[in-house]
């Protein structure tokens, strides 16, 4: 035997005897059926790919043979598949959102094992073409609810404009506005109005400015003094124009003093220090706090209480409501502040919007009550029909599965 051949055979034998021969990684079995379909309710740029798990992809295996799934795509007219994504084990679907509307695509799914092992590719049976949908039917019921609420708002606005009186529940804090301004007039002391500390783009500030119009109209009618410190320049401008319009509407434009509406500072506690200092010096008989407030709410309310003023507050800030309730005579809680603008102004579009929102609240409350009753009945009776109705209500009406 040739010497080189002998040494080669001997080395191979020793290597094998030493147990160091390489072991090839076991390839997992391929996934089951692969399905590709146009993704619904989109602009035509996505495809949903679904597959059955590989037989080697078990929930709790002794040794995991499948660690991920690789998704491959080939556009019609191309020859090779391209990797477009990867999903972890026990996953059955993938969304390909990089498609071109109108193009046709072929898909394959490969099960990946440890150490780079790959299964044979499982292919979708036919190509899929993504198409743009003109309507998003997943939000069908949301659209129905929106139409009901929006239609109610329009209906009540038209009803108010026709001269029909819309009933609004009396709010004690608003009924006290006349009393507070009248008390300040009798005592010869000013009325203080604080429109919150946020800018004019905040809804609470806008609602507060509307209430200011009513207060300014009363001060003009009763010949009382009004003091409106602001912490935003735009709020000052809006409040000044509102007060001027109120005095003009009361027939007393000459009594309007633009210096009664003034700007202090944008700094939160600097503004509060300026307002409370003025309260201690001039001791107003009526204080109104309408708008958005933060930590300064208790300082303002306690100072007003200390000078003996009758106080009416309103805010939609939940964390500040307890302070106003404890230190003020009347407090508008949450949406009562927004209702106050419609209640005091009497404008048809505000009253109509308020009544339309009530329809939406009734509809939402009805859905909650019906859902609770159905859920309770389904648990107690275990009726299949009740479970189906509850599932439809949860997934379709309140969810995003549409019609």
Image: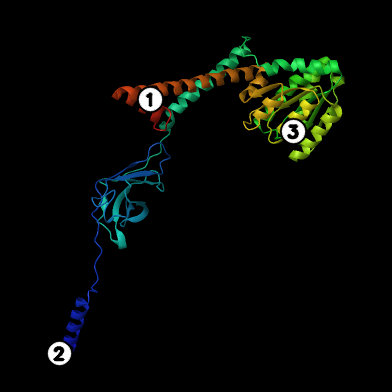
Q: Are marks 3 and 1 in contact (CB under 8 Å)?
A: no
Q: Quadrant of residue 239?
A: top right
In screen coordinates, is 282 left or right of 327?
right
Instruction: Give how far across and how far down residue 360 sits, in percent.
Output: 52, 21
N-terminal label among 3 and 1: 3
Query: Which residue is rendered at x = 59% and y = 12% of the image?
Result: 159
Instruction: Give how far across and how far down residue 197 sits, in percent.
Output: 72, 34
The residue to which callout 1 is attached is 375
What distance separates the C-alpha of mark 3 from that of mark 1? 47 Å
In screen coordinates, is 59 left or right of 194?
left
The residue to which callout 2 is attached is 2
N-terminal label among 2 and 3: 2
| Residue placed furthest toward the bottom | 3
Q: Is residue 391 above or below residue 60?
A: above
What distance separates the C-alpha of mark 1 from that of mark 2? 87 Å
Quadrant for the C terminus, please.
Answer: top left
Q: Is residue 221 above or below residue 364?
A: above
SS at mark 2 in the image? loop
SS at mark 1 in the image? helix
N-terminal label among 1 and 2: 2
In screen coordinates, is 134 left or right of 1?
right
Q: Residues within 10 Å of mark 2 (few under 14, many from 20)?
A: few
The residue to which callout 3 is attached is 299
Quadrant for the N terminus, please.
Answer: bottom left
Query: Which residue is rendered at x = 62% and y = 9% of the image?
Result: 165
SS at mark 3 in the image? helix
Instruction: Give how far across and how far down residue 119 sits, in percent.
Output: 25, 57
Which of discs 1 and 2 lies nearer the camera? The answer is 1
């Amino acid at each position: 035997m040739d010497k080189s051949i002998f040494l080669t055979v001997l080395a191979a034998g020793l290597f094998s005897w030493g147990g160091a021969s390489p072991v090839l990684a076991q390839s997992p079995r391929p996934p089951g059926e692969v399905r590709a379909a146009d993704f619904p309710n989109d602009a035509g740029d996505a495809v949903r790919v679904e597959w059955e798990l590989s037989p080697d992809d078990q929930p709790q295996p002794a040794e995991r043979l499948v660690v991920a799934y690789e998704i491959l795509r080939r556009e019609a007219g191309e020859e090779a598949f391209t990797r477009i994504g990867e999903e972890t084990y026990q996953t059955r679907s993938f969304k390909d959102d990089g498609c071109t509307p109108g193009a046709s695509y072929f898909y394959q799914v490969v099960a990946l094992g440890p150490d780079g092992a790959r299964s044979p590719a499982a292919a979708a049976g036919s190509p899929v073409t993504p198409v743009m949908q003109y309507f998003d039917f997943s939000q069908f019921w949301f659209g129905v609810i929106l139409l009901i609420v929006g239609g109610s708002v329009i209906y009540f606005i038209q009803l108010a404009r026709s001269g029909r009186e819309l009933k609004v529940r009396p709010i004690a804090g608003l009924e006290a506005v006349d009393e507070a301004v009248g008390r300040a007039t009798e005592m010869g002391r000013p009325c203080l109005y604080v429109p919150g500390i946020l800018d004019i783009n905040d809804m609470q500030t806008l609602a507060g400015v509307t209430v200011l119009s009513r207060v300014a109209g009363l001060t003009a009618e009763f010949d009382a003094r009004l003091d409106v410190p602001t912490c935003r320049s735009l709020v000052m401008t809006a409040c000044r124009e509102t007060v001027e319009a109120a005095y003009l509407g009361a027939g007393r434009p000459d009594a309007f003093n633009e210096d009664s509406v003034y700007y202090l500072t944008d700094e939160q506690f600097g503004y509060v220090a300026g307002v409370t200092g003025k309260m201690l010096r001039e001791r107003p008989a009526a204080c109104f706090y309408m708008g958005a407030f933060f930590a300064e709410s208790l300082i303002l309310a306690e100072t007003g209480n200390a000078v003996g003023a009758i106080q009416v507050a309103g805010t939609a800030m939940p964390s500040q409501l307890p302070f106003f309730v404890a230190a003020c005579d009347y407090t508008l809680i949450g949406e009562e502040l927004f209702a106050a603008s419609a209640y005091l102004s009497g404008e048809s579009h505000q009253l109509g919007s308020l009544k339309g929102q009530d329809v939406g609240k009734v509809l939402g409350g009805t859905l909650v009550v019906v859902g609770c009753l159905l859920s309770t009945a389904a648990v107690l009776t275990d009726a299949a029909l009740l479970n189906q109705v509850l599932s439809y209500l949860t997934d379709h009406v309140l969810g995003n599965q549409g019609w």
